[in-house]
């Protein structure tokens, strides 16, 4: 019981930290990566609640679909900084 509580608190802190990072980060790429961390952490919460189907759907739909879509959008719309020759 004590280990479950410690794991819950640890992943709750990861979820809140990643969520705050998504909002406060100025770089869109890092914000998208932190969104992935928050979504994976929510999937871990589902596993801890013994809702394995919801955890798998969280990973497949949100991490596998939505986050990849956001990542592609960030990569395709990113502009080059001024003075860059690349």
Image (cartoon, rainbow, N blue to C red):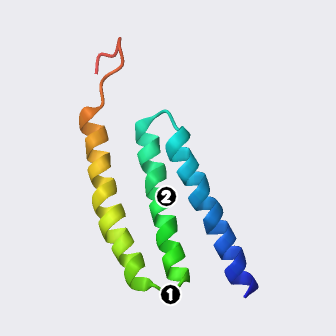
Instruction: Decide: is 44 above or below 15.
Output: below
Left or right placement of residue 31 versus residue 65 in this view: right
Which residue extends farthest top?
Answer: 83
Circle 2 Cα neighbour tier, 10 Å, few/some/many (<14 / 14–19 / ≥20): some
Q: Quadrant of residue 36?
A: bottom left
Instruction: Decide: is 63 above or below 29.
Output: below
Quadrant location of the N terminus? bottom right
Left or right placement of residue 8 versus residue 27 in this view: right
Which residue extends farthest right?
Answer: 2
Q: Position of residue 32 (x, y in %)?
A: 41, 47
Question: Residue 64 shows which numbered tag?
Answer: none
| Residue depicted at 54% across the width and 74% down the height | 45
Circle 1 Cα neighbour tier, 10 Å, few/some/many (<14 / 14–19 / ≥20): few
| Residue depicted at 50% across the width and 68% down the height | 42
Q: Quadrant of residue 51?
A: bottom left
Badge 1 vs badge 2, beta-carbon distance below 8 Å: no
Left or right placement of residue 10 versus residue 24 in this view: right
Q: Position of residue 41 (x, y in %)?
A: 52, 66
Q: Earlier in the sequence, mark 1 or mark 2?
A: 2
Quadrant location of the C terminus? top left
Count of all numbered marks drawn on residues in the image = 2
Q: Quadrant of residue 73?
A: top left
In front: label 1 or label 2: 1
| Residue depicted at 39% across the width and 79% down the height | 54
Q: CA distance from mark 1 to mark 2?
A: 20 Å
Identify residue for label 2: 37
| Residue depicted at 71% across the width and 82% down the height | 3
Identify residue for label 1: 50
Instruction: Decide: is 33 above or below 57.
Output: above
Q: Secondary structure at mark 2?
A: helix
Q: Position of residue 19 (x, y in %)?
A: 54, 52
């Amino acid at each position: 019981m004590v280990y479950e509580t410690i794991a819950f608190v640890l992943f709750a802190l990861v979820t809140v930290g990643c969520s705050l990072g998504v909002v406060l980060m100025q770089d869109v790429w890092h914000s998208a990566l932190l969104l992935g961390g928050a979504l994976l952490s929510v999937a871990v919460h589902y596993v801890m609640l013994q809702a394995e189907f919801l955890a798998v759907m969280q990973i497949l739909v949100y991490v596998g679909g939505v986050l990849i879509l956001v990542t592609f959008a960030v990569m395709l719309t990113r502009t080059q900084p001024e003075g860059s020759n690349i």
